[in-house]
Amino acid sequence: MQNGFVESFNGRLRDECLNEHLSPTLRHARHLIAAWRDDYNHHRPHTSLDGLTPWEYHRRSAKDQTLNRAN
């Protein structure tokens, strides 16, 4: 195994996106992958982030940093 994170991500992309859709063109495949990537990076809860979406995690981290600077 070269990199566990990359291998895990590649497997998830393959299982959840590429194996689910037939893409007649490269343009269509790029559109599907972009939509999946947006959902994965912004809207889907991640166990590594305590069940938060990346947006929620970022918002909480920024809020915590702002509170820490004020104290």
Image (cartoon, rainbow, N blue to C red):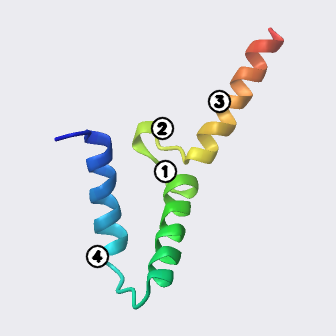
Mark found first going from the N terminus, 1 or 3: 1
Residue 17 against residue 12 in the figure, above or below: below
How many neighbours does mark 2 have within 10 angstroms: few (below 14), some (14-19), or many (20 or more)?
A: few
User: Dots 3 and 4: beta carbons under 8 Å?
Assistant: no
> How many numbered tags mark residues here?
4
Mark found first going from the N terminus, 2 or 3: 2
CA gap, disc 1 to disc 3?
16 Å
Q: Give the amino acid at mark 1.
A: Pro
Mark seen at residue 61: 3
Question: Residue 71 location, x and y as percent?
Answer: 80, 8
Q: Give the amino acid at mark 4.
A: Asn
How many neighbours does mark 4 have within 10 angstroms: few (below 14), some (14-19), or many (20 or more)?
A: few
Mark found first going from the N terminus, 3 or 4: 4
Q: Nearer the viewer, mark 3 or mark 4?
A: 4
Asked which secondary structure carries label 3, the reply is helix
Residue that label 1 marks: 45
Q: Nearer the viewer, residue 28 or 45?
A: 28
Residue that label 4 marks: 19
Q: Give the amino acid at mark 2.
A: Leu
User: Dots 1 and 4: beta carbons under 8 Å?
Assistant: no
Q: Image quarter for residue 2?
A: top left
Whether residue 1 sits left or right of residue 39 in the image: it is: left
Question: Residue 15 location, x and y as percent?
Answer: 28, 67
CA gap, disc 2 to disc 1?
8 Å
Question: Residue 42 location, x and y as percent?
Answer: 58, 54
Mark seen at residue 66: none
